[in-house]
Image (cartoon, grey):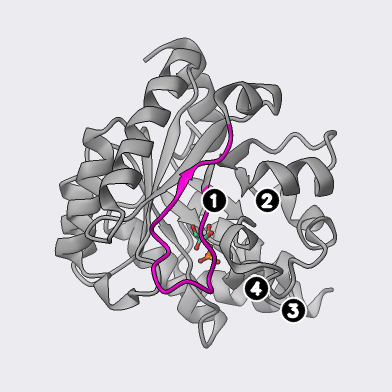
Amino acid sequence: MDWGMNNRLSRIIKPDTGRALILPIDHGYFMGPTRKLEDPWETVEPLLPYSDGLMLTRGILRFSISPGSDVPIVLRVSGGSSILKEDLSQETITTSIFEAVRLNASALALSIFVGAPHEHESLANLADLVNDAEEYGIPVLAVTAVGKELEKRDARYLALCCRIAAELGARFVKTYYCEGFERVVEGCPVPVLIAGGPKMDTELDALQTTYDALQEGAVGVVMGRNIWQNEHAVAMIRAVRAVIHEDMTAKEAHDLYNQLKAGE
Ligand code: R5P
């Protein structure tokens, strides 16, 4: 792997543990002002010391994030649909490679919609983006998106999506955790991370999902709402981080969460 590509990936997937915690705040690109992201900087500033990457669009990066931050930027470069449409799969590449370089992106993120009406366009977008990004040594994170069809998230389907993403040149993939998740990882030659999804009933659920995904081969999480919609977001991100980088069990990390929360 080229030095630049390797270096950018190593800033996110930490070489000492081989794992990563990416904090996504890109939800607004199709969902609008999601709860707790109305003022992104207020929410994320205290979380950045515990994040291995911040995933967001160029607009929020430029207008809301201090350029003095040294968190690696995972720039969301696909978009073009909104939550008001039944089909969310009609996306385009929204940000040029030159803009990504100008913004010092450490990685680029783009959604693919396998099996959706605009499957072909989204896969062609990924291939085009990889062609550009490889020229500059910037890794592409493919996001296996399902739009509103959440029931699609089973191992067979997600294994298909992740494999296609890797075949088209994604350097790492974000997908969903599911029953039989090992199958998804086994069929994918590049590192796999899981999304957190909507806020779960309890903190322990989110920590357990993180733990299980890692045991089954994920290298980390791209977890947003289960962290920053928590009333004790710093305690939560530190607990998730302990599972990822310190091999804590979900129960141990939950105890840590409670301790940190009590000390706030
Ligand atoms: C989808 O790509 C979204 O924009 C988020 O990046 C993703 O869903 C991860 O965030 P969360 O953990 O809140 O689901």
In which quadrant will I find the N terminus?
top left
- Range of the magenta residues? 79-95
Q: Which residue is label 4 attached to?
A: 257
Given the image, on which type of amino acid does mark 4 rest?
Answer: Tyr
User: Which comes before the other along the chain, label 4 or label 2?
Assistant: 2
**Of residues 47 and 92, which is closer to you in this image?**
92
Q: Which residue is label 3 attached to?
A: 231
Q: Do the numbered discs 3 and 2 sit on residues whose CB atoms are within 8 Å?
A: no
Q: Which residue is label 2 attached to?
A: 50
In which quadrant will I find the C terminus?
bottom right
User: Which comes before the other along the chain, label 1 or label 3?
Assistant: 1
Crowd tier of the residue under label 4, counting other residues whose Cα lies within 10 Å: few below 14, some 14–19, many 20 or above? many
Given the image, on which type of amino acid does mark 2 rest?
Answer: Tyr
In the shown orientation, is residue 214 left or right of residue 81?
left
Using the numbered discs, state the Cα–Cα distance from disc 3 to disc 2 in whole angstroms: 17 Å
Place of residue 75 in the rendered image (x, y in percent of width and height, measured from the top left): 59, 40
Using the numbered discs, state the Cα–Cα distance from disc 3 to disc 4 in whole angstroms: 12 Å
Give residue 225's quadrant in the image.
bottom right
User: Which comes before the other along the chain, label 3 or label 2?
Assistant: 2
Determine whether the residue tagged by mark 1 lies in a helix, strand or loop: strand
Height in image: 42 above or below 50? Answer: below
Identity of the residue drawn at 71% across and 75% down: 35
Q: Nearer the viewer, mark 4 or mark 2?
A: 2
Determine whether the residue tagged by mark 3 lies in a helix, strand or loop: loop
Using the numbered discs, state the Cα–Cα distance from disc 1 to disc 3 in whole angstroms: 19 Å
Crowd tier of the residue under label 1, counting other residues whose Cα lies within 10 Å: few below 14, some 14–19, many 20 or above? many
Q: What secondary structure prevails in the magenta region?
A: loop
